[in-house]
Amino acid sequence: MKFTLKNLGIFEKETSIELGDLTIICGDNNTGKTYASYAIFGFLNIWDHIISFDIPEDKLQKLYDNGVIQLDLNDFAQTIDSKVLAKLSANYTEILPRVLNFHEDFFKTTLFKVCSYSDNYRNNSFESVIKTKSGKEILKFDKQKGSNVLQISLLIEDENVSILSFSQIIHFAKPNIARALLENHFPTPFIISSERTGVSLFYRELDINKNRLVERLQNQDKQFEMSSYLGMIEEVTSRYALPIKKGIDFVRDIFDIHSKKKSQLLKEHPEFLEIIQEIVGGEYKVENNQILFAFGEKKIPLYMASSAVKSMLELYFYIISIAKNGDILMIDEPELNLHPANQRKLARFFARLVKVGIKVFITTHSDYLIKELNNLIMLSDEFKYKDEVLKELGYSSEDNLAPSYIKAYVADNKTLSLAPITEYGIGVDSFDKEIGAINRAFNEITLAKGI
């Protein structure tokens, strides 16, 4: 999956970024890392709603008349590279101002282009059921693994078919046909922004204030329209870029999602819970409509916990409630507020995630994180006395990552450059330069002082 960017934020030069199982963007401050990650997240979040391709109306009319049709996805796949991706890129570039919540003039010459398509839809199964607001099932989409046939079934009784108009069938069909074709190619994104520490506290307080406001207004004026006031409050979060808004919504929904489901990841790999709890130093609990942090025999409100605990909140609940094979987890500065020891643990955590099928995309300033990934790259090779080295240094047999999993980039000079990856790890000159400079300074100072 490859994208081309130009005139996006600070990226004045045309630049390409191909996503790997683990994608890393390093670089100095204000070099465009967040622009790249936010733009890619926005695309992955909404592509299926802005895709455009021709759907034979006679097929959908047959569905409307007979209640079931079968579509050959090969007929749609033939035009994806030649027409569909170009139109999809243009559609997304047009709405980028709304995704990043900035004025249109800033994006007048922006290019965001989806450059590649992988014809792998036969390898996945697909099922989707469309329901009314009352929960009544009206349409079902189904494709079996290894098949190129998508079956669409009308689930409502013949006498009630009029409640679903022909235009609604087209409306529902387009994104679902798109997902059946491309869901395997465009992973489901989950993003954690660098504003997460504030978000973990801010939106809970906003909910409390909203409830108080509604109560007061109800007491003062029984005729007011509640929806208009709630809409006014919701406008506060709409002022942010889409990734931040998604973070606010997720934290707000933690009170519902934590008790309703267990993630596919934990069902298949329960060891990830112990790993994430080790990094956090405890566990989060939702009790009495508040989030608590539990460590040892103690439980404290989230607002009393450390900045590291607040920073890890979204990642923790993503892992236990949502994470599944085929996702892409995107984190802006995963090292935020973490001690170097935990930054190293997080690197090993990411390596394990990508090996069980969850892609990871990070932007980082952390030399500790990169250096630990380099250790894992070196441990992916077999060498004499490897078992002894693992034991002595505290690594497990799972702590390794082949270079083929990784795509690394450096944001600099108004573009992105591919970082070299060898058997010794990822080369990031800006980190190495500063480490060398601080070591030289230390040596010069100690020499001058005669130490």
Image: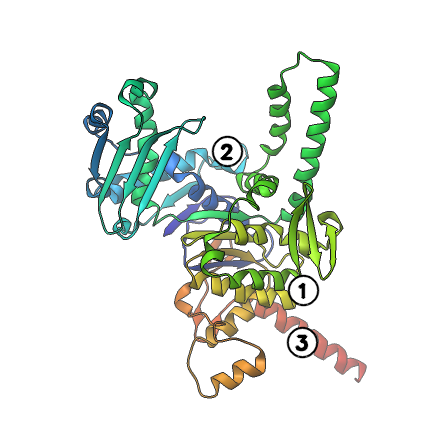
Residue extending furthest toward the top: 223
Q: Residues within 10 Å of mark 1 (few under 14, many from 20)?
A: few
Residue bearing the label numbered 2: 98
Q: Nearer the viewer, mark 2 or mark 3?
A: 2
- SS category of the residue bearing label 3: helix
Task: Tell me: residue 176, above or below residue 420.
Answer: above
- Give left or right: position of 145 versus 13: left
State if disc 3 and disc 2 touch (CB < 8 Å): no
Residue 10 horizontal/vertical position (percent): 52, 47
* Residue at left offset 41%, top offset 42%: 111
- Give left or right: position of 81 versus 329: left
**Label 2 – label 3 distance at C-alpha:** 47 Å
Task: Tell me: residue 400, above or below residue 334.
Answer: below
23 or 119: nearer the eye?
119
Q: Nearer the viewer, mark 2 or mark 1?
A: 1
Earlier along the polypeptide chain: callout 2 or callout 3?
Answer: 2
Callout 2, which amino acid? Arg
